[in-house]
Protein backbone atom coordinates (compact mmCIF):
# COMPACT_ATOMS: atom_id res chain seq x y z
CA UNK A 1 0.00 0.00 0.00
CA UNK A 2 1.55 3.25 -1.14
CA UNK A 3 1.07 6.30 0.98
CA UNK A 4 2.30 8.80 3.50
CA UNK A 5 2.51 7.79 7.13
CA UNK A 6 2.65 10.25 9.97
CA UNK A 7 3.22 9.09 13.50
CA UNK A 8 2.04 9.36 16.13
CA UNK A 9 -1.52 10.56 15.52
CA UNK A 10 -1.66 12.29 18.91
CA UNK A 11 1.31 13.65 20.83
CA UNK A 12 1.53 15.39 24.18
CA UNK A 13 4.59 17.23 25.41
CA UNK A 14 5.50 19.51 28.25
CA UNK A 15 6.36 23.10 27.50
CA UNK A 16 10.05 23.60 26.88
CA UNK A 17 10.67 20.15 25.41
CA UNK A 18 11.64 19.51 21.82
CA UNK A 19 9.53 16.97 19.97
CA UNK A 20 10.02 15.24 16.60
CA UNK A 21 7.15 14.32 14.30
CA UNK A 22 7.69 11.49 11.88
CA UNK A 23 6.74 11.46 8.18
CA UNK A 24 7.48 8.56 5.85
CA UNK A 25 6.36 8.04 2.25
CA UNK A 26 6.72 5.12 -0.13
CA UNK A 27 5.36 6.89 -3.20
CA UNK A 28 8.80 7.56 -4.64
CA UNK A 29 8.07 11.29 -4.42
CA UNK A 30 10.99 13.68 -4.57
CA UNK A 31 9.32 16.63 -2.83
CA UNK A 32 8.06 16.66 0.75
CA UNK A 33 6.35 19.37 2.77
CA UNK A 34 5.26 20.19 6.31
CA UNK A 35 2.15 22.25 6.94
CA UNK A 36 0.48 23.43 10.11
CA UNK A 37 -3.26 23.86 10.51
CA UNK A 38 -4.80 26.11 13.14
CA UNK A 39 -8.51 26.88 13.46
CA UNK A 40 -9.50 29.54 10.94
CA UNK A 41 -5.98 29.74 9.52
CA UNK A 42 -6.00 27.17 6.77
CA UNK A 43 -2.77 25.33 6.00
CA UNK A 44 0.48 27.21 6.40
CA UNK A 45 3.81 25.96 5.02
CA UNK A 46 6.56 25.33 7.56
CA UNK A 47 9.36 23.69 5.53
CA UNK A 48 9.71 21.92 2.23
CA UNK A 49 12.31 19.76 0.53
CA UNK A 50 12.67 19.05 -3.16
CA UNK A 51 15.51 16.56 -2.97
CA UNK A 52 17.52 14.65 -0.39
CA UNK A 53 19.84 16.74 1.77
CA UNK A 54 18.16 19.98 0.71
CA UNK A 55 15.28 21.90 2.27
CA UNK A 56 13.90 25.44 2.39
CA UNK A 57 11.98 27.49 4.91
CA UNK A 58 8.32 28.06 4.28
CA UNK A 59 6.17 30.88 5.58
CA UNK A 60 6.32 30.01 9.29
CA UNK A 61 9.65 28.21 9.85
CA UNK A 62 10.64 29.92 13.11
CA UNK A 63 10.91 27.44 15.98
CA UNK A 64 11.01 24.41 13.69
CA UNK A 65 13.78 22.31 12.14
CA UNK A 66 13.82 19.50 9.58
CA UNK A 67 16.17 17.02 7.97
CA UNK A 68 16.04 15.08 4.71
CA UNK A 69 18.63 12.33 4.93
CA UNK A 70 16.52 9.84 2.98
CA UNK A 71 14.09 10.31 0.12
CA UNK A 72 11.36 8.53 2.08
CA UNK A 73 11.64 10.47 5.32
CA UNK A 74 11.17 14.11 6.32
CA UNK A 75 10.99 14.47 10.13
CA UNK A 76 9.95 17.75 11.71
CA UNK A 77 11.29 18.90 15.08
CA UNK A 78 9.22 21.37 17.05
CA UNK A 79 11.67 23.16 19.29
CA UNK A 80 11.11 25.01 22.55
CA UNK A 81 11.57 28.23 20.56
CA UNK A 82 8.22 27.74 18.85
CA UNK A 83 5.88 30.02 20.80
CA UNK A 84 2.57 28.33 19.94
CA UNK A 85 3.36 24.70 19.14
CA UNK A 86 -0.08 23.24 19.82
CA UNK A 87 -1.56 22.55 16.39
CA UNK A 88 -2.42 19.92 13.80
CA UNK A 89 0.64 19.10 11.69
CA UNK A 90 0.37 17.73 8.17
CA UNK A 91 3.06 16.19 6.02
CA UNK A 92 2.70 16.00 2.25
CA UNK A 93 4.67 14.74 -0.71
CA UNK A 94 4.60 15.10 -4.47
CA UNK A 95 6.62 14.24 -7.58
CA UNK A 96 7.33 17.95 -7.85
CA UNK A 97 7.07 17.98 -11.61
CA UNK A 98 4.95 19.88 -14.09
CA UNK A 99 3.28 16.66 -15.17
CA UNK A 100 2.38 15.61 -11.62
CA UNK A 101 2.21 18.68 -9.38
CA UNK A 102 -0.44 17.38 -6.96
CA UNK A 103 0.60 16.90 -3.35
CA UNK A 104 -0.74 14.04 -1.24
CA UNK A 105 -1.13 14.31 2.51
CA UNK A 106 -0.66 12.10 5.51
CA UNK A 107 -3.30 11.74 8.21
CA UNK A 108 -1.73 14.37 10.44
CA UNK A 109 -0.35 14.58 13.97
CA UNK A 110 -2.17 16.51 16.66
CA UNK A 111 0.46 18.00 18.96
CA UNK A 112 -0.61 19.35 22.33
CA UNK A 113 1.91 21.15 24.50
CA UNK A 114 0.95 21.58 28.13
CA UNK B 1 -0.75 39.02 2.87
CA UNK B 2 -3.18 36.33 1.88
CA UNK B 3 -2.55 35.27 -1.70
CA UNK B 4 -5.39 32.75 -1.84
CA UNK B 5 -8.72 33.77 -0.36
CA UNK B 6 -11.84 31.80 0.38
CA UNK B 7 -14.18 34.46 1.61
CA UNK B 8 -16.99 32.17 2.71
CA UNK B 9 -16.06 30.31 5.90
CA UNK B 10 -19.14 28.13 5.56
CA UNK B 11 -21.84 27.05 3.13
CA UNK B 12 -24.98 25.03 3.71
CA UNK B 13 -26.95 23.33 0.90
CA UNK B 14 -29.69 20.77 0.54
CA UNK B 15 -28.94 17.27 -0.68
CA UNK B 16 -29.35 17.04 -4.45
CA UNK B 17 -28.75 20.75 -5.05
CA UNK B 18 -25.63 22.41 -6.39
CA UNK B 19 -22.80 23.48 -4.10
CA UNK B 20 -20.60 26.33 -5.35
CA UNK B 21 -17.39 27.08 -3.49
CA UNK B 22 -15.42 30.15 -4.47
CA UNK B 23 -11.76 31.08 -4.36
CA UNK B 24 -9.86 34.24 -5.33
CA UNK B 25 -6.14 34.72 -5.75
CA UNK B 26 -3.89 37.74 -6.02
CA UNK B 27 -0.60 36.34 -7.31
CA UNK B 28 -0.59 36.46 -11.12
CA UNK B 29 2.28 33.93 -11.17
CA UNK B 30 -0.04 31.17 -9.99
CA UNK B 31 -0.81 28.88 -12.91
CA UNK B 32 -2.09 25.67 -11.37
CA UNK B 33 -4.99 25.36 -8.97
CA UNK B 34 -6.20 22.49 -6.82
CA UNK B 35 -9.10 21.69 -4.56
CA UNK B 36 -8.71 19.51 -1.50
CA UNK B 37 -11.37 18.04 0.75
CA UNK B 38 -10.70 17.57 4.45
CA UNK B 39 -12.55 15.78 7.22
CA UNK B 40 -11.81 16.64 10.88
CA UNK B 41 -8.59 15.14 12.28
CA UNK B 42 -7.60 13.76 8.88
CA UNK B 43 -5.26 14.88 6.14
CA UNK B 44 -6.67 16.67 3.07
CA UNK B 45 -7.43 14.53 0.06
CA UNK B 46 -6.88 15.78 -3.47
CA UNK B 47 -10.13 16.35 -5.33
CA UNK B 48 -9.63 18.08 -8.67
CA UNK B 49 -7.23 20.51 -10.32
CA UNK B 50 -7.02 22.90 -13.25
CA UNK B 51 -4.20 24.40 -15.22
CA UNK B 52 -4.30 28.05 -16.22
CA UNK B 53 -4.41 27.05 -19.88
CA UNK B 54 -7.94 25.73 -19.31
CA UNK B 55 -11.10 27.38 -18.04
CA UNK B 56 -12.94 24.24 -16.98
CA UNK B 57 -12.15 20.77 -15.73
CA UNK B 58 -14.74 18.16 -14.90
CA UNK B 59 -14.56 14.92 -12.94
CA UNK B 60 -17.85 13.23 -12.22
CA UNK B 61 -19.92 15.42 -9.93
CA UNK B 62 -17.09 17.92 -9.51
CA UNK B 63 -16.31 20.75 -11.91
CA UNK B 64 -13.77 23.50 -11.42
CA UNK B 65 -14.03 26.75 -13.36
CA UNK B 66 -11.18 29.22 -13.75
CA UNK B 67 -11.53 32.88 -14.71
CA UNK B 68 -7.96 34.12 -15.13
CA UNK B 69 -8.84 37.72 -15.82
CA UNK B 70 -10.80 37.91 -12.58
CA UNK B 71 -8.29 35.72 -10.70
CA UNK B 72 -11.20 33.63 -9.54
CA UNK B 73 -11.99 29.94 -9.49
CA UNK B 74 -14.96 27.97 -8.28
CA UNK B 75 -15.77 24.37 -7.48
CA UNK B 76 -19.22 23.08 -8.39
CA UNK B 77 -20.58 19.90 -6.86
CA UNK B 78 -23.70 18.53 -8.52
CA UNK B 79 -25.67 16.87 -7.07
CA UNK B 80 -24.50 17.48 -3.51
CA UNK B 81 -24.54 14.53 -1.15
CA UNK B 82 -24.36 14.38 2.67
CA UNK B 83 -20.96 12.65 2.36
CA UNK B 84 -19.63 15.80 0.68
CA UNK B 85 -19.86 17.60 4.03
CA UNK B 86 -16.28 18.61 4.81
CA UNK B 87 -13.89 21.55 4.67
CA UNK B 88 -12.79 22.40 1.14
CA UNK B 89 -9.46 24.07 0.58
CA UNK B 90 -8.46 25.91 -2.54
CA UNK B 91 -4.72 25.83 -3.30
CA UNK B 92 -2.55 27.54 -5.89
CA UNK B 93 0.87 26.85 -7.30
CA UNK B 94 3.46 28.58 -9.42
CA UNK B 95 4.68 25.67 -11.51
CA UNK B 96 7.42 27.83 -12.98
CA UNK B 97 8.79 28.48 -9.54
CA UNK B 98 10.53 25.08 -9.50
CA UNK B 99 9.41 24.13 -6.01
CA UNK B 100 5.73 23.24 -6.53
CA UNK B 101 4.79 24.36 -3.04
CA UNK B 102 1.10 24.99 -2.53
CA UNK B 103 -0.43 28.13 -1.11
CA UNK B 104 -3.75 27.39 0.58
CA UNK B 105 -6.83 29.40 1.35
CA UNK B 106 -8.41 29.21 4.79
CA UNK B 107 -11.07 26.76 3.69
CA UNK B 108 -14.86 26.64 3.41
CA UNK B 109 -16.91 24.30 5.56
CA UNK B 110 -19.59 22.71 3.39
CA UNK B 111 -22.60 21.15 5.09
CA UNK B 112 -24.99 19.15 2.92
CA UNK B 113 -28.31 18.60 4.66
CA UNK B 114 -30.33 15.45 3.95
Image (tube, coloured by chain):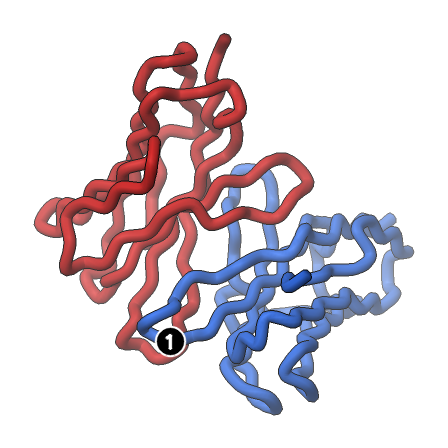
Chain colours: A blue, B red
Q: Is residue A13 left or right of residue B113?
A: right
Q: Residue at the location (33% across, 71% down)? A: A99
Quarter of the picture containing the N terminus of chain B is bottom left
Whether residue B2 can be seen here? no
Q: Image height check: is A13 above or below A93? A: above
**Label 1: which secondary element:** loop
Look at 32% across and 41% down and name the residue there: B59
Viewer-nearest residue: A64 or A66: A66
Instruction: Residue A29: give x, y in percent of width and height.
Output: 54, 75
What is the count of numbered marks?
Answer: 1
Q: Residue at x 69, y 77 (%)?
A: A73
Q: Which residue is mark 1?
A: A97
Residue B24 showing in the rendered view = yes
* Image point (38%, 67%), residue name: A101
Label 1 neighbourhood size at 10 Å, few (<14), some (14-19), many (20+)?
A: some
Place of residue B92 in the rendered image (x, y in percent of width and height, measured from the top left): 34, 57
Amino acid sequence: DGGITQSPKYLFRKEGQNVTLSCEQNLNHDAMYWYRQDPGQGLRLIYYSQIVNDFQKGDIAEGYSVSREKKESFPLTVTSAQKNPTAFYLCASSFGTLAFPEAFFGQGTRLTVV
Amino acid sequence: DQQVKQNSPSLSVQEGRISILNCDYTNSMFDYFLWYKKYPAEGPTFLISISSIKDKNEDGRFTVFLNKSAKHLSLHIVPSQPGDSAVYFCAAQNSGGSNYKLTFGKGTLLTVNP
